[in-house]
Image (cartoon, coloured by chain):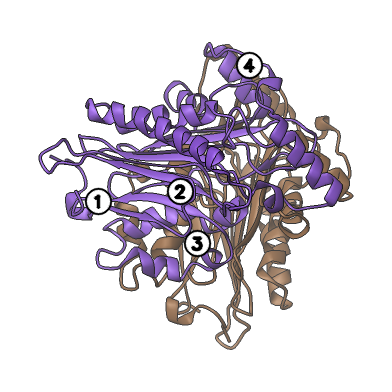
Chain colours: A purple, B brown
Amino acid sequence: MKNLIALIALALMPAAALAEAPAPDAPKWSLAIHGGAGTLDPAQMTPERRAEYEAALQAALDAGAKVLAEGGSAMDAVKAAIIPMEDSPLFNAGKGAVLTWDGTNELDASIMDGRDRSAGAVAGVKTVKNPILLADKVRTDSEHVFLMGAGAEAFALDKGFAVTPPEYFATPARREALERMKAKQLSALDVDHKFGTVGAVALDQKGNLAAGTSTGGMTGKRWGRVGDAPVIGAGTYADNRACAVSATGWGEYFLRVGVAHEICAFKASVYAPCRKVNTCLANCRAWRCIRRLILLFCPTPAQSGTVR
Amino acid sequence: MKNLIALIALALMPAAALAEAPAPDAPKWSLAIHGGAGTLDPAQMTPERRAEYEAALQAALDAGAKVLAEGGSAMDAVKAAIIPMEDSPLFNAGKGAVLTWDGTNELDASIMDGRDRSAGAVAGVKTVKNPILLADKVRTDSEHVFLMGAGAEAFALDKGFAVTPPEYFATPARREALERMKAKQLSALDVDHKFGTVGAVALDQKGNLAAGTSTGGMTGKRWGRVGDAPVIGAGTYADNRACAVSATGWGEYFLRVGVAHEICAFKASVYAPCRKVNTCLANCRAWRCIRRLILLFCPTPAQSGTVR
């Protein structure tokens, strides 16, 4: 398995975990998840709080791992892993998403299938419980890749998604963060730094890759701000010939660099069969400016495609 | 100049033009524009109509060329070239943009500076006369890269943009196209094929690259559909170390492939100093499925940076 996949988890990984089939003769699959970028403040992180996070991450990991262990697809595993994190108030996605400047929740998500690079994304949705499922529905049931705002919600309604009351998403902790931000004129990083976007990347037993990302964005975001999470190529990318990437960090930098696609493009054999991802990262200016967490699976070019 | 820049205009170029400083000792700059992808139907294209398009393209080209000839920046040239096309009812951007399913105009634009990869983008704006200027304002006057919908319009208002009445944008030809699409259950390609997105790429005398794209999207688009034009990495990308790209075509394919970034990533010396863009394109599946037009400037790695 180690020969098959290079898992690179860059920089700090306060809320990430990895499940991998242990025995050499066990089915070959792999899954990595993240619960956001940033530094956990030890003063704020009690043993009980830490246990809560670890349990929530483990539940997400277990849900995705179960799909893969039973021979399910990477796409299904990514969704299975992300849904519990969207449903948990601990993470900045779905329930527990950070609040906009106006005190609302605007949710972004995207998902990509490495088999055919089909992708779906939504930005600024307010009434969909699991945005990752809506992103996937855009992928499978529309001619489009990327839907936004009220239009994306109309699409959800059209496709049978329940309308979730906006008040479902907000939590007291997120309200307090917004109020603190406004009162003390803090930046989003000051109040968001303990929490984050969620994401997952998976390699299934058939050798297919998938990636997904879901987020509430940044506390106090305004003007319909779209970050990297719903942008295919910035926060999410998957290509069986290269990588699956889910990113979290300061989205604007990821958008400018096209981080997820840049890593995949670098890995793809057509571009640079002999170079290392590290060379790419060493040349990536934004890399040195941001707190970030990237999970990626990179089968070598010769090994991508079928995996036995 | 020919050694300095490889201009590659792929596939059909019904509405593209190129201006270049002619004399060997003249200042080194270059500009290319496009007025959309697709096939022009000779039966529909009278000599008068053709002359109208050519004059509109020439006016755009002249506006951008003037900036560059006078030593202005690539960014200013891109804006100067795109504004007349947004203002012309002939193109699918600004005035003359195609209509959504609901009969409204939702405008998308993005711009990127190759010097520092700073970028701005807007999607789904309805009351801004020149979306390319709003995209640039996002780049220069916000902490963000990408704003959407009503939020982007609130930002525009905040920054002093005039509110343009939505009826300014629609033209009888676009209303007829939407009605025909609905009546005959045609696809967007059936009614859009003679018109298109606008874009420009420029290299200024200091050797800096810039790219910009502006569009109304696809006739009859629904659900807040976002195409490639406002997505940095899909429809627009600029990096002094590699390329400047403005794309037009079926946006969903460009989003999945990350076309603009893919071309720049391929060109960047860090990835593949010895390969040709054609190799990349030959390996790009979407390339064979879509009608498209890409304009790109690709100084070789050794020559990027300063140009004398």
Residue type at numbered disc 2: Gly
Q: Which mark is residue B163?
A: none
Q: Mark 2 or mark 1, which is nearer to you?
A: 1
Q: Determine the residue positioned at 71% across, 21% down.
A: A167
- Whether the residues at callouts 1 and 4 have beta carbons within 8 Å, the answer is no
For disc 2, the chain is B
For disc 3, the chain is B
Which residue has dot 3 on it? B296
Q: Determine the residue positioned at 87% across, 39% down.
A: B163
Of residues A84 and B223, the one nearer the viewer is A84
Residue type at numbered disc 4: Thr
Q: Is residue B239 visible?
A: yes
Residue B232 screen position, x and y as percent = 57, 51
Q: Which mark is residue B258?
A: 2
Q: Determine the residue positioned at 83% across, 52% down.
A: A185
Give the CA distance from mark 1 to mark 3. Answer: 35 Å
Label 3 residue SS: strand
Residue type at numbered disc 3: Leu
Same chain check for tags 1 and 4: yes
Which residue has dot 4 on it? A164
Q: Which mark is residue A5?
A: 1
Q: Determine the residue positioned at 67% across, 22% down.
A: B176
Q: Residues within 10 Å of mark 4 (few under 14, many from 20)?
A: few
Residue B75 screen position, x and y as percent = 68, 65
Label 1 residue SS: loop
Of residues A169 and B138, the one nearer the viewer is A169
Give the CA distance from mark 2 to mark 1. Answer: 24 Å
Q: Is residue B143 above or below residue B49?
A: below
Same chain check for tags 3 and 2: yes
Label 2 residue SS: loop
